[in-house]
Amino acid sequence: MEVKLQGPYHTGGVCMKCLLVLLVVILSFAVVFGGGVVEVFSWWTGGGEEEGLFAIFEVFNEWYPDVEIINATVAGGAGFAAKAVLKTRMLGGNPPDSFQVHGGMELIDTYVVTGLMEPLSDHLKEWGIYDKFPSAIMDICSYNGIVYSIPVNVHRGNVVFINNAILEDVGIERVPDDWPGFIEAMKKIKDAGYIPLALGDKDKWEAAHLFESVLISTLGAYNYNGLWEGRTSFDHPGIEEAVDIFHELMNYVNDDHAALTWQEATRLVFDGEAAFNVMGDWAMGYLKTLGWTPGVEFSWMTVPGTKGSFMVVTDTFGLPKNAPNRENALKWLKVIASVEGQDAFNPIKGSIPARVDANKELYDDYLVWSMNDFATNALCPSIAHGSAAAEGFITALNDALNLFIANQNKAQFLRTLRNAASEYVY
Amino acid sequence: MLVSLAVLSPSFAAITVFVYVFIGSSIRTSMSNWNSFARLLSGEYVFVGTQNYVRLFQDPRFQSDLWNTLYFTLFFILGCLAMGIILAVLVDRNIKGVGVFRNIFLFPMAVSFVVTGTVWRWVFAPGNLPNNPRGVNLLFDMLGLNFLQWRWFTSTESFLNFNLALIPVIIAAVWQMSGYTMALYLAGLRGIPSALTEAAEVDGASPWQVFWRVKFPLLRPITLSAMIILGHISLKIFDLVYAMTGSGPGNVTDMPAVYMFETTFRANRYATGSAIGIVMLIMVAIVIIPYLVNAFKKEVKTS
């Protein structure tokens, strides 16, 4: 379509120009760097994440100095904007060489069952590192026993972050790790004039994040995992119990939760306004960025009733079919699967490596605690972060929770949840 | 004749492809069962008729979206028109330094809705009342006007299906677009021949009467254009709401465009997303087509 457009409707023309410019830029890269390029697509643009990504890029450049990395990032928390861009590119037959995707259904349901990804098991075996990852994490990244993406890091979802000064002020020495005790403690904190539980659910997934942690506590890891494997029914009484606890928790969250993002909620803990915050351990990275030291100003524990369970949020990279620079993409995957790559990335990002043989000395107290739990606990895939269920289910759950928090209609919530389950899970 | 056809044909082809073919393709998608990524990719077209539309109109979220759009559009247009004409009249005097104010009023239009939304989110973030107010609530606290403190866009109160949480969003939108409305009115005011106003003044009309009886009726076409332009912005509003409030608790500030984005690109429900898009297209068409028909008739008359 080499058309010259006139008049007010020249959007098509601008697009063509953009594409041409892009093409020229990419081609010139290819000419300058003989080894070619590799386009790595991610949503790592925030503090800690971007530095971590650059640290892997450094390792890559050491290993393959003649291959140039194109860092294709789309900003936006939890990758919502990036995922939309990626889907459009995959649909249009214009995949990047390798892209970030949460391990689990976000990968499997969207890209693997539709036949858009290349299997990676053989490559992992060829590199001799197939058995260096825990089998539970490999299961999350696999479909019919074949691995389709390589996990680069693991975050834990079911963590409570605690402002130590507030607890001292209120006079709580040990935070109980069962719900009745925890709620009792929150009552005390509320009476003392603090916000007991910081929540920021402007983007909705934060509420689902809290709910799924409660769900593990009432169902147990085995039954929770059973929901996604077809062992546990959505009529299980543990689900109703979780809804009741979640409902109770809403009495202890900040009034303005609907106006805040997760960072702003974590910030309430930092500012000394709120005592607890249930968030994935990226919140720890954020608190560290703000200047706190783990164990000094703040401490952490698993969400009440979830000791022994590890809610897994894992970022992985896969190899789409028809990747324009397939050979270089494999080099990239080899780097991120290596101990060097994972140990360069994770201490900076504030996550633990997916490999079992990483160097523990590089990680701080919290991360070592998390690594030990990761090695011994039951691993549970996260719903809110795309591992447990198809993306349609996540959106339905987010919407249902958002409505439930506002209208507190439990029957309606359970009905929506079960309908979504029968549409997307069974 | 041949030359004009040759000149027109590229844009004609481009519009056909990039506008009408895509509208057609959206309608087609909206009547399919492509509510998952796998079904969309398979390319196998299964016609389900109006099923997606029926489910959509039964969906409580979409119902609140429609109410929100209705009230948002209504108050947004009224607010912009009122602010626009007031500012235009104030600026339409030959006082020194008036150009500075004109630019100040027009300036918000140069800022993108995403920036506006983020800043107004900070302004109207309620904080935790009564101890830790934020934004305007903090301001009210300092001024001793605590009775004005309110939960703003996190409020779930509603009146005749009008979610009061929309008020801050409407304020932000009016702030952004009233300068533009002012510019439209200003052009209109400048276009009124001074002979008319002078004649009225000679006949003893007060300035108020001159405005209401002479100028305002002459500004009717401007008002209509402004309504159309503002109306189509508000029916399609996405960025402001998305950056400022998101869906809000219980979808109190949700809009069809936000739902369309989420259902299409997060939930992979492409058919439902297309259906929302088509409903939005129809809403905009209802507003715009009468205007276009009217304008076309006039053009035919004058030529």
Image (cartoon, coloured by chain):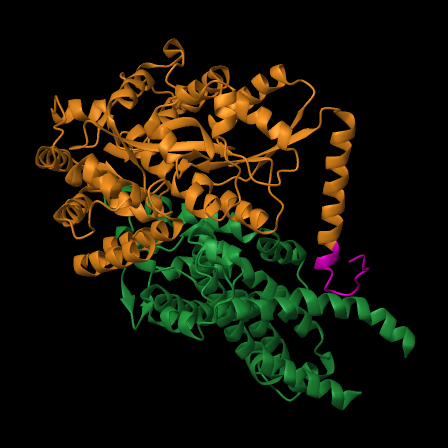
| Residue in front for this viewpoint, A90 or B71 | A90
Position of residue B290 relative to residue B252, above or below, is below
Span colored in magenta? A1-13
User: Foreground residue, A13 or A145?
Assistant: A145
Instruction: Using residue A342 as the reference point, say whether residue B163 is left or right of it.
Output: left
Q: Quadrant of residue B247?
A: bottom left
Is residue A7 shown in magenta? Answer: yes
Q: In the displayed image of the protein, which residue is found farthest to the top?
A: A361
Specify the principal SS of the magenta part. loop
Picture coordinates of residue A356 (x, y %)?
A: 37, 18
On screen, residue A165 above or below A232 = above
Residue sitting at 74 percent across and 41 percent down?
Answer: A23
- Asked if residue A150 lies in the magenta stretch, the reply is no
Q: Which chain is orange?
A: A
On the rendered structure, is A201 left or right of B102?
Answer: left
Percent across and percent down for residue B81 are: 53, 70
Q: Quadrant of the C terminus of chain B?
A: bottom right
Total count of labels:
0
**For residue B30, above or below residue A310:** below
Q: Which chain is green?
A: B
Using the rendered image of the protein, determine whether residue B63 is visible from the camera's viewpoint: yes
Q: In which quarter of the view is residue A367 placed?
A: top left
Q: Nearer the viewer, residue A60 or B93?
A: A60
The image position of residue B168, as x and y in percent, is 40, 57
Classify the position of the N terminus of chain B by image quarter: bottom right
Left or right? Give the position of A252 relative to A29. left
Position in image of residue A423 (x %, y %)? 32, 58
Can the viewer see residue B150 in this picture?
A: no
